[in-house]
């Protein structure tokens, strides 16, 4: 068994990140001890591999201070000339903490200049989000403020790449080492913000929708369908409802071998931006039963104000559980994604854990796709304020369709550039045995191009 010696400072943090990297991503058995040295040391069979401890040693007495963030100009390491053979997105990789380089000494011991453990902790714990106070109009941590965006590596799973560098160094020291590589996966989800069109709720709203279809969208057929939907839905016939694509979503994903998670809202904190339905409605209950019967998953879509409200989030979680129980829906775990991707580190994670939520899928940026946490692997979270591991697992969000297509964000529409961007994110997530997590709202299938792009991304 491998032995990992940890530096004395920030031991809880070092213990957590070593379990995520060695026990989680690499899936190798190891035991830990502590030393007075300022190095991480992996030992096995009489040989050693050392790594610097720069982040933890620097942050120990300055926890959550801006001085502990990475430098504005990061050094870059070209692994082609560095002696290691690691599978990366690109041969050149920025170094968050540490320095480029790897060497074997005359005794066969290895020395890696990259602070893999400290750098991975910085990204996975979302440390910088507890340091910086920047926020957008929805009180979200903005992508453009992040180290990943500023250093131009948001589009690559840098933690997964660092782990591959570590593994390459380990196999140089111990060629006999083996690991069981994880199988790449596609994880598809749907946030149910609007299970049915809001315009069907009043004649005035229907009129505005029809006029918009004709004048702004220049689609007479859509205008006719909007009018018919308003009429037929009032007598329980939803065949003209454009948002009622749930069976189609399940059909195409079942063909691709995917299990879809549908996140439902169970409360309202800000009615003008939260869902236009009640989870207790008959048609919503029927939909949830159908999802469950077809083998897909139901999760909670925490309403707009829950990201900082433990009481409100617990009430919504309990409401979802009650409805599921009444409908005979039995799931071992319930996951969550926050509405508008609102998140406060680490407060939101604590609220979810206290409410008995097992996994979350919020951590991606609304304004652009990418790897907010630096990984495409699911992992247990860490509370950087209370400085303890959490039971809550994070499934990082890589692509949300609105981020790429909508004018509010990148505004690429249904162009080839839009598809190539999302497809590239998928390839990079899965290249290193990770999970490509895709969010596509049921209300975003307004054109045949939406369906074509979606089917191509999910693998049909």
Image (tube, grey):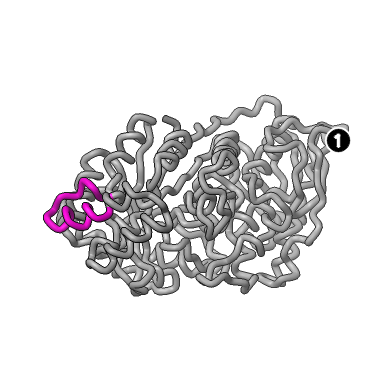
Q: Is residue 3 above or below residue 179?
A: below
Image height of 346 relative to 53, above or below: below
Residue lying farthest to the top in this orientation? 176
Identify the residue at horizontal 28%, vertical 64% (top origin): 207
Inspect the magenta stretch and tell me whether residue 240 lies in it. Answer: yes
SS assignment for the magenta stretch, majority: helix
**Residue 352: x %, y % from top left:** 40, 63
Where is residue 420 shown, x and y percent of the image?
58, 38
Instruction: Give the x, y percent position of residue 314.
Output: 32, 68
- Relative to 458, residue 129 above or below: below
Name the spot of residue 24 as percent of width and height, x first. 53, 43
Residue under pointer 1: 105
Q: Is residue 251 magenta?
A: no
Q: In the picture, residue 234 is in which quadrant?
A: bottom left
Q: Is residue 215 visible?
A: yes
> Which of 226 and 414 lies nearest the eye of the viewer?
226
- The boundaries of the magenta stretch are 226-241
Tag 1's secondary structure? loop
For the N terminus, give its image quadrant.
top right
Residue at horizontal 27 percent and vertical 48 percent from the top: 244
Give left or right: position of 421 versus 215. Answer: right
Q: Residue furthest left?
A: 235
Q: Does the rendering let one see residue 29? A: no
Q: Residue at x 54, y 50 (%)?
A: 404
Tell me: residue 459, above or below residue 209.
Answer: above
Q: Quadrant of the C terminus?
A: top left
Number of marks drawn: 1
Q: Badge 1: how crowded within 10 Å, few (<14), some, or many (20+)?
A: few
Please indicate whether residue 11 sits to the left or right of residue 36 in the image.
left
User: Hey, which quadrant is residue 147 in on the image?
Assistant: bottom right
Name the residue located 72 percent from the left edge and 59 percent from the top edge.
55
């Amino acid at each position: 068994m491998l032995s990992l010696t940890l530096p004395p400072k920030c031991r809880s943090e070092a213990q957590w990140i070593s379990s995520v990297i060695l026990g989680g991503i690499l899936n190798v058995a190891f035991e830990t001890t502590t030393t007075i040295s300022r190095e991480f040391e992996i030992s096995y069979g009489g040989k050693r591999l050392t790594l610097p401890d720069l982040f933890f040693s620097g942050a120990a007495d300055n926890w959550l201070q801006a001085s502990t963030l990475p430098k504005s100009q990061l050094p870059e390491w070209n692994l082609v000339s560095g002696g290691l053979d690691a599978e990366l997105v690109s041969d050149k990789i920025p170094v968050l903490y540490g320095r480029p380089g790897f060497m074997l000494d005359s005794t066969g011991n290895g020395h890696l200049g990259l602070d893999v453990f400290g750098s991975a902790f910085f990204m996975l714990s979302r440390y910088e989000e507890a340091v910086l106070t920047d926020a957008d109009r929805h009180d979200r941590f903005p992508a453009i403020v992040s180290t990943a965006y500023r250093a131009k590596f948001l589009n690559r799973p840098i933690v997964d790449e660092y782990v591959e560098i570590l593994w390459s160094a380990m196999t140089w020291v111990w060629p006999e080492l083996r690991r069981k590589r994880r199988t790449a996966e596609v994880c598809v989800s749907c946030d149910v913000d609007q299970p049915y069109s809001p315009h069907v709720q009043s004649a005035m709203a229907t009129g505005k929708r029809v006029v918009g279809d004709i004048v702004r969208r220049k689609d007479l057929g859509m205008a006719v369908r909007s009018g018919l939907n308003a009429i037929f839905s009032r007598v329980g016939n939803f065949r003209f409802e454009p948002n009622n694509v749930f069976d189609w979503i399940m059909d195409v994903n079942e063909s691709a071998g995917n299990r879809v998670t549908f996140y439902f809202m169970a409360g309202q904190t800000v009615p003008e931006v939260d869902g236009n339905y009640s989870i207790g409605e008959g048609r919503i209950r029927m939909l949830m039963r159908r999802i469950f019967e077809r083998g897909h998953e139901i999760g909670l879509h925490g309403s707009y104000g829950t990201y900082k409200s433990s009481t409100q989030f617990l009430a919504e979680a309990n409401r979802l559980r009650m409805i599921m129980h009444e409908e005979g829906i039995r799931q071992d775990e319930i996951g969550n994604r926050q509405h508008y991707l609102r998140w406060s580190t680490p407060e939101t994670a604590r609220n979810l854990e206290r409410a008995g939520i097992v996994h979350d899928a919020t951590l991606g940026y609304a304004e652009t796709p990418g790897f907010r946490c630096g990984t495409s692997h699911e992992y247990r979270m860490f509370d950087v304020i209370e400085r303890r591991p959490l039971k809550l697992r994070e499934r990082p969000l890589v692509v949300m369709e609105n981020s790429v297509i909508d004018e509010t964000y990148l505004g690429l529409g249904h162009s080839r550039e839009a598809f190539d961007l999302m497809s590239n994110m998928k390839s990079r997530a899965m290249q290193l045995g990770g999970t490509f997590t895709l969010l596509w709202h049921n209300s975003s299938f307004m054109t045949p191009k939406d369906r074509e792009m979606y089917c191509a991304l999910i693998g049909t």
